[in-house]
Every structure is written in structure tokens, then in C-alpha cells.
Amino acid sequence: MAQINEQLIADVVRQVLKGVNGGTQPAAASGSGISAADYPLGMKRKDLLKSPRGIPFEELTLENIESGKVTFDDFRISPEVLKMQGEIATSAGRSQIALNLGRAGELTKVPDARILEIYNSLRPHRSTKDELLSIAEELEKKFGASVCANFVRESADVYQRRKLLKGDLPSAE
């Protein structure tokens, strides 16, 4: 397996961002003051990174795995880190990526098995509108994932207009 040269990737990202921003440095994002200049966080701002259980990034080592100090769950991304990544995207003028990272942050609270069930429910002709609206309500009330809930509600409306709900016949076009 090829080893990833993180410094090379960081340099390429900086060059791309420089081109996207017309040669100017991106402005700092709102919130924690993180900007594209802090990318990648794992190299430049390790001090800010923590596991979902609060273990500092520097302590996520093989030795601590072997001792049991860290577990598999410590290697999952936290909503806070996704928020910082979103701030980086915003500062680089990538608002859609920032929105996607915000949705991902909300989904960290949803069990993996449930995410897969929801994913399958969102496939065309798999769910009724009421089933999709029920999923949206669950996301909002049970997991506090209001952005994702609105996405599912919007999907239900679009599927209804395009006849993509369960029971709708596919178009013969």
C-alpha cells in the first residue's frame, strides 16, 4: 500500500486554494478562527483535535491501543472536528463542502446501522412520503439533526413531484 505524503497533499491543496482565490489568502472563517491556512489540521493544529471521548490527537497511538487507553471509537471523527473542517471550507470559499461537513457532523450522533437504513430508504421507489417524513422527524427529535431532517423533507417533496416514491410507477420515457 502506498504511503501518503501528507506534506505534498497540503502543498497541493494550498496551490489549488491560491488559484481558486485569485492568488489571495482566504479569509478566516467565523467561529474558532480556523482557516484554510490551518489545513491539514492533523499537521498544523493537532492541539485542537480530540477524539469523541476527548482523547487528544497526540495520544491516539499504537501503544495506547495496546494498553486499552484508546478504543476504536476514539478514531471516529467528532462533530467538533467536522465543524472545524467546515470552517476551513468556508474560508476557502467552498460553502457547499462546508454544508456537507455540517450534515456529517449531525450524523455522527446517528448509529451506523440506522444511517444505512436511512440511505436505503432514500433510494427511489423505496419509501412513501409518510415514511420519509417519519425519518425526518426521527432525525430531528431523536438525534438533533435538523439540517439532515430538512434534507430528507426536501427529498420527500422532490420524490413526490418526480414520482419517485414507493408505489409510483417509473416513467416510460
Image (cartoon, rainbow, N blue to C red):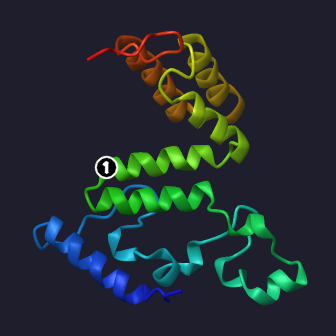
Q: Which residue appears farthest toward the front when viewing the image? A: 172
Give the residue at the far left of this rendering: 22
**In the rendered structure, which amino acid carries the disc numbered 1?**
Ser
Pointer 1: residues within 10 angstroms few (<14), some, or many (20+)?
Answer: some
Viewport quadrant of the C terminus: top left
Query: How many numbered discs?
Result: 1
Residue 28, how many percent across, how many down?
Answer: 32, 64
Q: Which quadrant of the structure image shows residue 77?
A: bottom right
Disc 1 element: helix
Q: Say whether residue 111 is visible.
A: no
- Examine the rendering and report whether any part of residue 56 can be seen: yes
Q: Residue at x 43, y 47 (%)?
A: 100
Residue furthest to the right in view is: 67
Q: Residue 163, relative to residue 11: is it above or below?
A: above
In the image, residue 26 sits, relative to residue 171, either above or below, namely below
* Identity of the residue drawn at 12% across and 74% down: 23
Q: Is residue 64 above or below residue 31?
A: below
Left or right: 129 in relation to 25: right
Q: Residue at x 70, y 38 (%)?
A: 114
Where is residue 13? Give x, y as percent.
30, 75
Q: Which quadrant does the N terminus fall into? A: bottom right
58 is higher (above) or lower (below) than 153: below
Where is residue 141 drawn, in percent x and y?
A: 68, 26
Quarter of the figure with residue 160:
top left
The residue depicted at 36 percent of the width and 81 percent of the height is 10
In the rendered structure, the answer to whether residue 119 lies left or right of residue 2 reads right
Q: Residue 70: x percent and y percent?
A: 81, 75
Left or right position of 96 against 71: left
Residue at image mark 1: 95
